[in-house]
Image (tube, grey):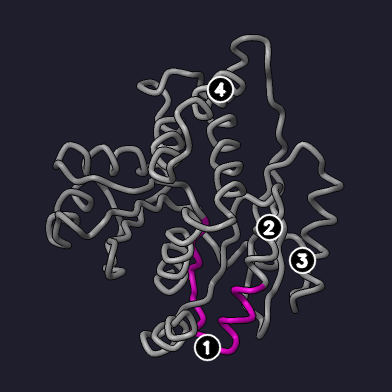
Amino acid sequence: MSGHSKWATTKHKKAVIDSRRAKSWAKLIKNIEVAAKLGGADLAGNPTLFDAVLKAKKTSVPKDNIDRAIKRGAGIGGESVEYTSIMYEGYGPNGVALLIECLTDNKNRAAAEVRTAMSRNGGNMADPGSVAYNFSRKGVIVVPAEGTTEDDVMMAALEAGAEEVTNEGDTFEVITEATDLVATRTALQEAGIEYDSADAAFVPNLKVEIDADTARKVFRLIDALEDSDDVQNVYSNFDLSAEVQAELESDED
């Protein structure tokens, strides 16, 4: 997951300041609404909502937008939201595996947009189960490297049940069982270590290293999928070597 994480982190930083900010905010707001609907409006008693709000704040979503999303999700004030979660499976260029997680109020629209993005960008839809078996539901915590050390993160996280900690350069990535996510991020907090995000995610059991040309095609496909308001997350099994990352970063120069 390391290569994908580095790419996603870099893209996320750019998304904060470019024209995709509105779409990014919309997806974060949707996460808040769903968390509030499932667990209530109290952040102290709803860790999923707490982390959804934290992530939105770190992406500069205005406080008024966050507060309104919590009320809509919890049904406070008469407003309510109703979303359906759908997982699509597919393959990108050179057989890269993709899990496409949707949160939508219109199944037909979501299906059409996913299929269109896949067909126009070198992807193919797959039968249910043919891709998902290679992924496991995990907790993923991203810790900024500034102000802490890998040893400090490992000490706090591993004692709380984390499976591994990887150094991604600007950040440390902590992987846990999904059921240990809250306990691990709480342990980091208690150790005085800040984190950027704590999410349940699908992590590949087996990663496939790809070259720069394939990576460019995969990124283009994932960008097209994420352009859909209904697509919340795209998970993949590709990995990038340091050399390929350097080549891709030179594209931006």
**Tag 3 near tag 2, CB within 8 Å:** yes
Where 166 sits versus 218, above or below? above
Which circle's residue, 4 or 1, is located before the other in the chain?
A: 4
**Tag 3 near tag 1, CB within 8 Å:** no
**Tag 4 near tag 1, CB within 8 Å:** no
Q: Mark 2 points at which residue?
A: 227
The CA span between labels 3 and 2 is 9 Å
Q: Name the residue under label 1.
A: 212
Please say whether residue 203 is one of the residues in the magenta stretch.
Answer: yes
Instruction: In this rendered view, identify the residue nearer to me: 84 or 138.
Output: 84
Q: Name the residue under label 3.
A: 117
Q: What element carries label 3?
A: helix
Name the residue at 56% across, 36% down: 29
**Left or right for 112, reference 147:** right
Residue 191, quarter of the rendered image? top left
Residue 54 % position (x, y): 39, 37
Which circle's residue, 4 or 3, is located before the other in the chain?
A: 4
Instruction: In this rendered view, identify the residue nearer to me: 131 or 246.
Output: 246
The CA span between labels 4 and 1 is 42 Å
Q: Is mark 1 on a helix, strand or loop?
A: helix
The CA span between labels 3 and 1 is 21 Å
Q: Is mark 2 on a helix, strand or loop?
A: loop
Task: Report the magenta residues as a range.
Answer: 202-220
Tell me the amino acid under the disc marked 1: Ala
The CA span between labels 4 and 3 is 31 Å
Residue 252 % position (x, y): 47, 79
Tell me the amino acid under the disc marked 3: Ala
Q: Nearer the viewer, mark 3 or mark 2?
A: 2
- Taking the view exactly as shown, the residue that stands out farthest to the top is 77
Q: Which of marks 4 and 1 is in front?
A: 4
Where 217 sits versus 236, above or below? below
Residue 214 % position (x, y): 60, 86
